[in-house]
Image (cartoon, grey):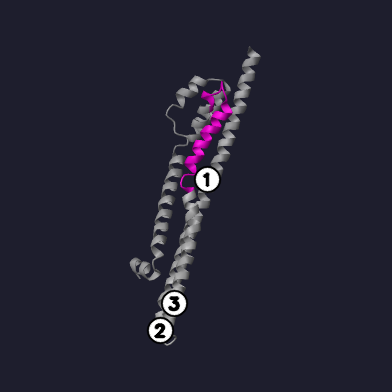
Amino acid sequence: MKMYDILQSGGPVMWPLLLCSLVVVTVIIERFLFWISLERNRNRALLDEVLSMAETGDWEMIREKTAGNRDYIIRLLVVGILHRDFDMGRAMEAEANVMLQRMNRYMPVLDTMITVAPLLGILGTVLGIISSFKMLGVGGIADPKLVTGGIAQALITTATGLTIAIIAVIPFNYFNSRINRAIHVMEKYTTSLDVVFQKAGMSQGERG
């Protein structure tokens, strides 16, 4: 059975379901590309080097070595370093919030599709059953073929809605797990920088 035939046999609700499926696929692809890009830009060797230079208080060297770097953790630490004389913690918190907004982009859309698609499937089921009862009232039990169209419509829309939701929920949970891991990593390194900065300040105070 061709795709167009399935859409036709499923009734009018199949068209918004088709739109939901397109939205889900688009968001999933965009988010996968986003996380791949984010991972490719990571520079763990430079990140460790930044923390080592922070221990010695070599702030200017940190600025030179991290110029143009796209690792979000390094950028987070550099923002804190640049604001070390004011409020390092708040500066890094603000930068982390900006990064989290990027990580959460389109996630509410995916969440909505997970909820809406099965509901649309149920709506198609109800409409199909109503159509079946109408046909039954017109043709009676003597002609059961008139009822099969409505039953098919009900089954196809339900299956389609559930399929879309199942396909969407797996990457949705995966992306959320990536966000949670990223939060943990950001907290780990911002805490490390704060500790290093405090040690550097104490060392300078003792030398003074």
User: How far across and down, in percent of the image, does residue 26 sit?
Assistant: 40, 51
Q: Amino acid at mark 2?
A: Gly
Residue 8 to residue 77: above or below: below
Our reading of the magenta stretch's main secondary structure is: helix
Residue under label 1, please give it.
178
Is 24 placed left or right of 90 in the picture?
left
Residue 205 in percent (x, y) is at: 64, 15
The residue at the point 48 percent across, 48 percent down is 107
Rendered-image quadrant of the N terminus: bottom left
What whole-number distance in Å separates the C-alpha atoms at marks 2 and 3?
Answer: 10 Å
Please give the name of the residue rendered at 58% of the width and 36% of the height, measured from the top-left corner: 187
Question: Is disc 2 surrounded by few (<14), some (14 to 19) or many (20+) residues within 10 Å?
Answer: some
Q: Earlier in the sequence, mark 1 or mark 2?
A: 2
Please tell me the numbered disc located at residue 139.
Answer: 2
For the C terminus, give its image quadrant. top right
- Residue 199 lies in what quarter of the image? top right
Residue 101 visible at all:
yes
Query: How much space separates mark 1 and mark 2, taking CA atoms?
Result: 56 Å
Callout 1, which amino acid? Arg
Q: Secondary structure at mark 3?
A: helix
In the structure shown, which secondary structural element does the residue marked by tag 2 occupy? helix
Q: Secondary structure at mark 1?
A: helix
Question: Which numbered disc covers residue 132?
Answer: 3
Q: Residues within 10 Å of mark 3 (few under 14, many from 20)?
A: many
Measuring from the top left, give residue 96's x and y in whole percent.
53, 35
Range drawn in magenta: 80-107
> Percent position (x, y) of residue 30?
41, 47
Q: Nearer the viewer, mark 1 or mark 2?
A: 2
Tell me if label 1 and label 2 are in contact, CB under 8 Å.
Answer: no
Query: Is residue 102 highlighted in magenta?
Result: yes
Check if residue 62 falls in the magenta segment. no
Please say whether residue 49 is visible from this viewpoint: no
